[in-house]
Structures are given as C-alpha cells and as structure tokens.
Amino acid sequence: EVQLVESGGGLVQPGGSLRLSCAASGFIVSTNYMSWVRQAPGKGLECVSVLYSGGTTYYADSVKDRFTISRDNSKNTLYLQMNSLRVEDTAVYYCARDLLIRGVTSATFDSWGQGTLVTVSS
Amino acid sequence: QSALTQPASVSGSPGQSITISCTGTSSDVGGYNYVSWYQQHPGKAPQLMIYDVTNRPSGVSNRFSGSKSGNTASLTISGLQAEDEADYYCSSYTSSSTLGVFGTGTKVTVL
C-alpha cells in the first residue's frame, strides 16, 4: 500500500527555518516525481516544488531561493528545507506523488500525505 | 502563473447532476489533455477523481466524469449524494510554468 507521512511542521518566527519530511512506503521515491503542495488556511492549493526522478528540481517563484527540495534514497524520504520563512508561507504542506512519469509534472497526484501545518508568526 | 478559474460554489439536490467548470487558457487547459480533478473534504488531503481530462483512477465512482471544450474543462457529478459535499479543485499542466497549476476551487453543497 502506498503511504506518505509528513512531519516537521510547527510554529516558527518570521525569518526562521523548518525542514519538512515525507516518509514514503509502498513505492520508491527516487523513481517517481515528487512534489510539495501547500494550502493556506481557507485557501486553495498551490504547487510549491517538484523533484523529478532524474534529480531536476523546480520551485514556485514565491519560494525560489528560500526553499530546497531533496530526497534521501536510503530512507525513501522526501524533504523540504524552508529558510527565511514569511507570514505568507503559513499553510498546510502536503507531499504528493505524480501519477505518471511523462517528462513534465502536470499536477496529477495520485497519492498525498496527511499534511503538516506550518505557522509563521511572531 | 495565475490559478485556473472555477465557480466559488455549486449546489444540487440528492440524485441530481451538477457540473463544475474550470477555465484556463491555451497555455494550460486548452492546449493539453492534462487536466485533473480533486475532491477535498474538510481537514483531509485532496483525492484524485479524474486525470487526463476523462480518466478515472481505480476505485473512483463512475458518477464522476470529466470533459473539455476549448479552454474550459468540466467535472460532472451525477446522482449527487450527501458524501459528495466537499471542495473540488481542477489542475493542469501549463507551458507557462515549470509547475502545475490548480484552480481556485469550488464548494459543492448537497441541498
């Protein structure tokens, strides 16, 4: 059974850092396209970052140069390092797996974690 | 990349059919058959209901169907049930970004 379990969220002051983890089971993270998607309180979904199986990474403009997506193949885990956090980064962060590997991400996610809440506030 | 446009809310009575629209541009919805639909209940993660415009993942009820015309994709829920009350989001590949784009979301209410 495919499962994704996020952890690492919490309350942090503006300018602070957090590292989110997404432990996967039932499939191999490194052979899939893996993404982080966030949802601000009462708002819609937003793709934040993607890590392709080949290692290529992309970021939303709003987080570029502040967030870093990575994976640990030995732990079958996806990460999101978040630095210089802003109030507007407050959201539930989900990790998600692309359903198909076809050269580009199309936000077609067949598996999602339960989400982890990041609150940026002073 | 701007979000795809969805109506804020749609409602229907049990047993009825409703349709949710998702409007984009030729750079996303209109240009590619990579439109997906998600259902999200309060406090829960989204669930994939439709992908590649018309395909249903295993386990999704055949009451859910998708279509596309021009720059607008649609999700139809037939035989509306109380459990269908949720938020629904469309998403699409976009040539304007390196990431996918989601719709603004639609709240479905079962009267």
Image: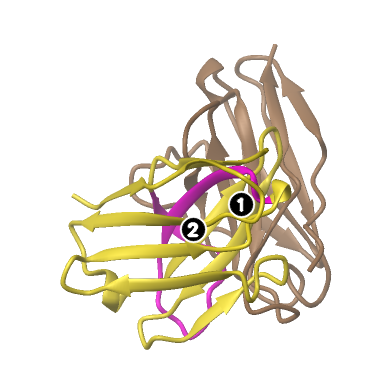
Chain colours: A yellow, B brown
Q: Position of residue B29 (x, y in %)?
A: 73, 67
In-front residue for pair A89/B95: A89
**10 Å neighbourhood of mark 2: few (<14), some, or many (≥20)?**
some
Q: Is residue B48 left or right of residue A24?
A: right
Q: Is residue A22 left or right of residue B77?
A: left
Q: Which mark is residue B55?
A: 2
Report how many numbered discs are placed on residues in the image: 2
Q: Is residue A94 magenta?
A: yes
Return the residue found at the far top.
Answer: B111
Quadrant housing the N terminus of chain B:
bottom right
Task: Say yes or no: labels 1 and 2 on the same chain.
Answer: yes
- Residue where numbered disc 1 is placed: B66
Q: Position of residue A28 (x, y in %)?
A: 22, 69
Q: Is residue A95 magenta?
A: yes
Q: Tag 2: residue type?
A: Asn
Residue A29 occupies which quadrant of the picture? bottom left
Q: Is residue B41 left or right of residue A114?
A: right
Vertical comparison of B40 with A50: above or below: above
Going from the N terminus, do you reach mark 1 or mark 2 first?
2
